[in-house]
Image (cartoon, grey):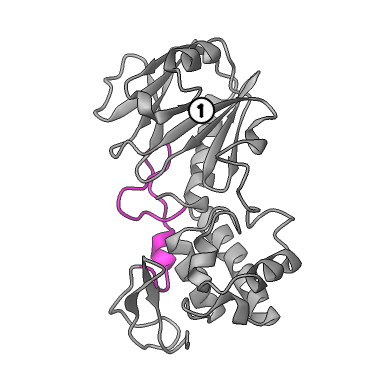
Amino acid sequence: MPELPEVETIKNTLKKFVINKTIEDLTIYWAKIIKRPDDTEEFRLRLLGQRILDVHRKGKFLLFELNDYMLVSHLRMEGKYNVYRKEEPVKKHTHVIFSFTDGTELRYNDVRKFGTMHLFPKGQELVSQPLNKLGPDPFDAAFTLDYFYKKLRKTNRLIKAVLLDQTIVAGLGNIYVDETLFKAGIHPMKRADTLTKKEVESIRLQAIATLKEAVAKGGSTIRSYVNSQGDMGMFQLELFVYGQENKACKKCGQQIIKMKVAGRGTHICPHCQKL
């Protein structure tokens, strides 16, 4: 699943290709992707004539700002956006096509068909599902030590599970949680309410730094992730633990191991992250 850095990269790429384009037509091949309104024809009609003013990101969600609406899109496991000329052949697994008045198209492709699209009148998107329960983005001013420490003190869940909880902090997924905890020297099975304030601050700062570095390198190419124009992210070359099982730790030389934590495959250095 694309995480914050990948979605940020997709957002930045899309801004170069779709800003100020007007939707002339909309073709929907897989209706279940459209979640709001649940009538796909109503969804289509509302979008006709709308111009894309900007593209935003909140957590792992893309937000297309239109004249009157906000289109909230989640890529889930395999969702991808690409821009094509109208005459170019439509690839398999293309489920939604936004046709613009300039002869180009924004096509949404999703092998797994897990992606979602919600359309809201502008201003309502943050007070309704799926965005209303999201925690602050790691880049938000609201993601302070005070906020984060208070949240962790209230739960005895494993820190790995808490960091994956999008209601606590939005945008982190399995890759960047493993990387953050390694850099902070924290074992993923530590209980959140046992962490010291210094440890919590280390996790917070390492999460921000790791995500910023990943954004700068265009995200990580794990399995099939590419940005909206087919370019691969390069942060996977910088990974310390994720996907590095049986390799030597870049810090201490001990072998990276893979284990199951909170139901997720988890990578750690047993020397650098003692429980």
**Pointer 1 residue:** 17
Of the pair 20 and 128, the residue shown nearer to us? 128
Q: Amino acid at mark 1?
A: Phe
Q: Main secondary structure of the magenta part?
A: loop
Q: Is residue 5 above or below residue 98?
A: below
Residue drawn 27% across the image and 30% down it: 93
Q: In this view, which residue lies farthest toward the left?
A: 92
Q: Dot 1 surroundings within 10 Å: few (below 14), some, or many (20 or more)?
A: some
Q: Position of residue 6 (x, y in %)?
A: 47, 49
116 part of magenta stretch: no
Q: Position of residue 160 (x, y in %)?
A: 49, 70
Q: Tell me where residue 20 sits by quadrant.
A: top right
In the image, the segment drawn in magenta is 219-242
Asked whether the viewer can see residue 102, the reply is no
Describe the element under mark 1 as helix, strand or loop: helix
Residue 246 is left or right of residue 249, and the answer is left
Q: Position of residue 44 (x, y in %)?
A: 47, 14
228 part of magenta stretch: yes
Residue 70 is left or right of residue 112, and the answer is right
Residue drawn 57% across the image and 38% down it: 129
Q: Is residue 142 above or below residue 98?
A: below
Asked whether the viewer can see residue 91, the reply is yes
